[in-house]
Every structure is written in structure tokens, then in C-alpha cells.
Amino acid sequence: MDDDDKDRVDPAITESSWTFGAVSDSVYFFGNDRDNSILSEFGWNLRPESASAEESGGDAGSFDRIGVEEEENDRLLMAAESTITTTATHCTGGEPGIQTRPVRDASKSNSSSSEDPPENSTASGENKPPAETSSKVKKKVQKRIRQPRFAFMTKSEVDHLEDGYRWRKYGQKAVKNSPFPRSYYRCTNSKCTVKKRVERSSEDATIVITTYEGQHCHHTVGFPRGGLVLSHEATYANHLTPSASQFYYPRAQFPQQCSHSVPQTHHVPGDARESHLLAEPNPQLPTDEGLLGDIVPPGMRNQ
DNA sequence: CGAGTTTGACCGGCGC
DNA sequence: GCGCCGGTCAAACTCG
């Protein structure tokens, strides 16, 4: 994120009356977990930092939609009313993030430009296939297994929101039914397989939808080209805008694909400007607001 | 000069 | 089988 962006924070957004929703394997959580006890049960650490947020009780938010699936969800989300809220979901995604990227033709894939994470090879057998035949077999067997994903809807004028990690853009595509392109980013940490997609809502151009895939296996690093090194401590120390520190910290286990394990990560999604979080669908749960409707009073959802 | 971005091409999944 | 579309690659380019 650049400083300009911080300066552009919509006052209405930084009001910091917000709510969150979190989802674990079988639990949706909505509301205000002030002592973080419930969230922590599910691996989330909520750090309401801004005084205003705490004073306001950290609630009074509203939800649009939660619990979604993949691409489709993005679209559903876009369709949702863009109230200024913060919701969060925790995608524990029982599967240790094993990403099996389809093995391309050796002639193409072996070029593995620097960013190809070594973990992929470990986890998915992207080790150079010994023979063409075996690679073909793998192609068949290895269906693409996605890592846990969750998305944020963020009201922001900038597309790529700073989140404390360094990302390298590796692609951009036009999105069907949307005037805005979708950008693809990979974490620049060579051991980290986290990716994210960033696109703007076609319904509300002020909303940026950021979808994270996978979990970081390292601490936050410096901002790209900015020279500002961000640790989570620094984050807490208000190096970010107040709204920017309304983070959800999944105390999640690091994916096993990471060779070096850090005791704890602080996931800092987006700049946490009023965001909507989404989760990978849980097969046991409704994927739309059905459940949400059961939990969140209608009046609360349309603010 | 290295790191990151752009962009057209390519590939695979999926629906028809 | 075919075409569409999302996702990725990688060469060329830009930037600091």
C-alpha cells in the first residue's frame, strides 16, 4: 500500500464500528467476541486496536454475505449490497495446504522462474517428472487441489492493498462480465506458496475483492520498494492507519509445505479497511447467506 | 542490475 | 468434440 492510499481512507469507513464473522470447519461465528475467546477457539486472533472500535464495542457491523465458493462467490459477493462492514471467516481448511499444480510440459515448466516455490515440488510432486509418461499420469491423477481460500471485500480506491507481505504479480486477466481485470499475485517468499487474486467488483467499483489462497509460512516482510519493514509488532504500534490494524490473525497452523516453521503467523489480510471476508465453502454448511440469516438478524445485515 | 510488472500465449477444466 | 474461461507462464519491459 502506498501512503496515498492511507490518506484516502474514507472517514465513514474508518469509523470503526464493525462486526466480524468467522468460520471454522463447522462453525460460523458472527458478532463481537470482545475478549477474543471464541475466535481463538477457532484459531483466530482478533486484535481490535483502534480506540474507537473498542469504544463502540466493536460491533454494530453488518454482513452481506459469507460462506461462498470460489469464483462464483466473488460474483455473489459483488452482488451483495456493499454496506461498510467487516466480516471475517477463518478457513481452516482441514487439508494441509497441498497444492498440486498441474505439471505442464517439461519443456515449459522446467524453466521455473525463480518464484516457483520449492514446496510445490515437495507437496505436489512437481519435481521434475522423470519421464513424460509419468507426468501424464500425474496430470490425470493430480486434480488441482486448492488450498484454503478466503476473500475480502475491501472498500478502497487502490486495487492492491498492502498487507505486510510482498507479492509478485504473475498475471492479469479480463474478467467476464466485469469491466475490471483480475490480477494474480504470488508471495515473493520462495518458500511460501500463498497466492492472491485481486479484482474490483463489477457492481461497485469502489470495492476490491482480494482472495487469498493458502497460508503464509513466514512473518510479514517489508513493503515492496517502500522500505517500510512491517512486523506485526510494528503493526500494533500503529504504523498503519487505525483501520488498517483491524486485522484478523489466524493463529493457524502453518501448512506443512513450509520447511521452516514459525511459531505463529500474523496474517494481515488487506489493509483491513472495512472488509468482507469470505470463506471457502464448507460442505457441511450452506454456502450462502442462509446460515447467516439464521444467525444475524436481518436488521443488522442491512446497514 | 535486480526485482517487479505487463501482456500475449498457452494449458486444463468444464459445460454444452 | 468444441469452445469458453480461469489460471499460469515467460519474455520483454519498466522502475528504483
Image: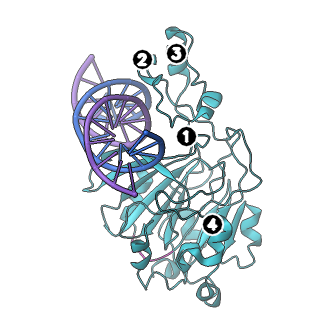
Chain colours: A cyan, B blue, C purple
Instruction: Estimate how packed mark 3 is, as few (under 14), some (14 to 19) or many (20 or more) residues with alpha carbons within 10 Å.
Output: many
Residue A135's disc is 3
> Do discs 4 and 3 share a chain?
yes
Badge 2 sits on which subunit? A
* For the residues bearing labels 1 and 4, Cβ distance under 8 angstroms: no
Q: What's under tag 1, amino acid-wise?
A: Arg
> Do discs 3 and 1 share a chain?
yes
Q: Nearer the viewer, residue A280 or A223?
A: A223
Q: CA distance from mark 4 to mark 3?
A: 40 Å
Q: Which residue is labeled 1 in the image?
A: A146
Q: Nearer the viewer, residue A53 or A237?
A: A237
Frontmost of labels 1 and 2 is: 2
Q: CA distance from mark 3 to mark 1?
A: 19 Å
Q: Secondary structure at mark 4?
A: strand
Badge 3 sits on which subunit? A
x 48%, y 54%: residue: A211
Q: N-terminal of the two: label 3 or label 1?
A: 3
Determine the image quadrant of residue A46. Answer: bottom right
Q: Secondary structure at mark 1?
A: loop
| Start-end of magenta stretch | A81-85
> Do discs 1 and 2 share a chain?
yes
Residue A107's disc is 2
Q: N-terminal of the two: label 2 or label 3?
A: 2
Frontmost of labels 2 and 3 is: 2
Q: CA distance from mark 4 to mark 2?
A: 42 Å
Q: CA distance from mark 1 to mark 4?
A: 22 Å
In the rendered view of the protein, which quadrant contains the C terminus of chain A?
A: bottom left
Q: In the rendered image of this protein, does residue A24 appear above or below residue A156?
A: above
Q: N-terminal of the two: label 4 or label 2?
A: 2
Q: CA distance from mark 1 to mark 2?
A: 25 Å
